[in-house]
Image (cartoon, rainbow, N blue to C red):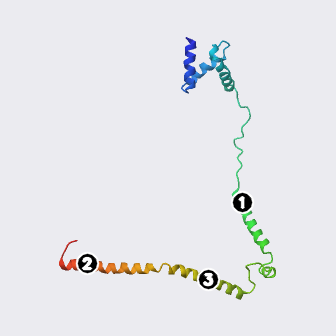
Amino acid sequence: MVLNNIEKLLEKYENGETSLKEEQVLKNYFAQDTIAPHLEHYKSMFAYFLGNQQEQYTKALPLNTKKTFNYKWVSVAAVAVIMLGVYVANPFGGAADCEQNLVGTFCEPEEAFNEVSKQLAMISSHFNKGTSAVNYLDEVNKGAATLNYLNEIENTTSIIFKTNK
């Protein structure tokens, strides 16, 4: 009778349908010395569960030692890095660029103005090429305006002849 009950509990346990009391009954049964031979392979599993149930964690948990990260110092460090980068890139002001002949820099304002004018003229010519490709849209707008005139004529003729739309 007890063996049938244990087998039913094992079947329920394998299906995940047992309660805590039923699992405790299984643990107690497999803690005994006399177990049915065909259920011997369950003994080590339930012995492990019973042993783990009695283990306790004895180390103290530090709950209030929370380290906060101060983001203000990150912004201060970022500003310091940017300032250092600006200083290292040009430590002596604008005169150092002319002496070192860096690529893309101009010592004379007239040279810089001429170069900027040349670049803006090139951009303007390319922009004008792009706008000439969409000039046909003006013709579409003219056609739409003509259609509006035809609608006005139709409205006036319907008023004159008193026809309903």
Q: Quadrant of residue 6?
A: top right
Residue located 70% across and 56% down the image: 70
Quarter of the image for the C terminus: give it: bottom left
Left or right of 5: which side holds 76?
right
* Residue underneath mark 3: 122
Residue type of the residue flagged with mark 1? Val
Nearer to the camera, 14 or 139: 139
Q: Quadrant of residue 27?
A: top right
User: Tag 2 or tag 3, which sits nearer the N-term?
Assistant: 3
Q: Is residue 155 above or below residue 71?
A: below
Instruction: For marks 1 and 2, give the one nearer the viewer.
Output: 2
The answer to whether mark 3 and mark 1 are in CB contact below 8 A is no
Q: What is the distance, in whole Å, between disc 1 and disc 2 at their CAs?
A: 72 Å
Q: Residues within 10 Å of mark 3 (few under 14, many from 20)?
A: few
Badge 3 element = helix
Residue type of the residue flagged with mark 2? Glu
Residue 134 in percent (x, y) is at 48, 78
Quarter of the image for the N terminus: give it: top right
* Residue underneath mark 2: 154
Residue located 55% across and 14% down the image: 4
Q: What is the distance, in whole Å, between disc 3 and disc 2 at their CAs?
A: 50 Å
Residue 54 in percent (x, y) is at 68, 25
Badge 2 element = helix
Q: Is residue 151 above or below residue 26?
A: below
* Residue underneath mark 1: 74
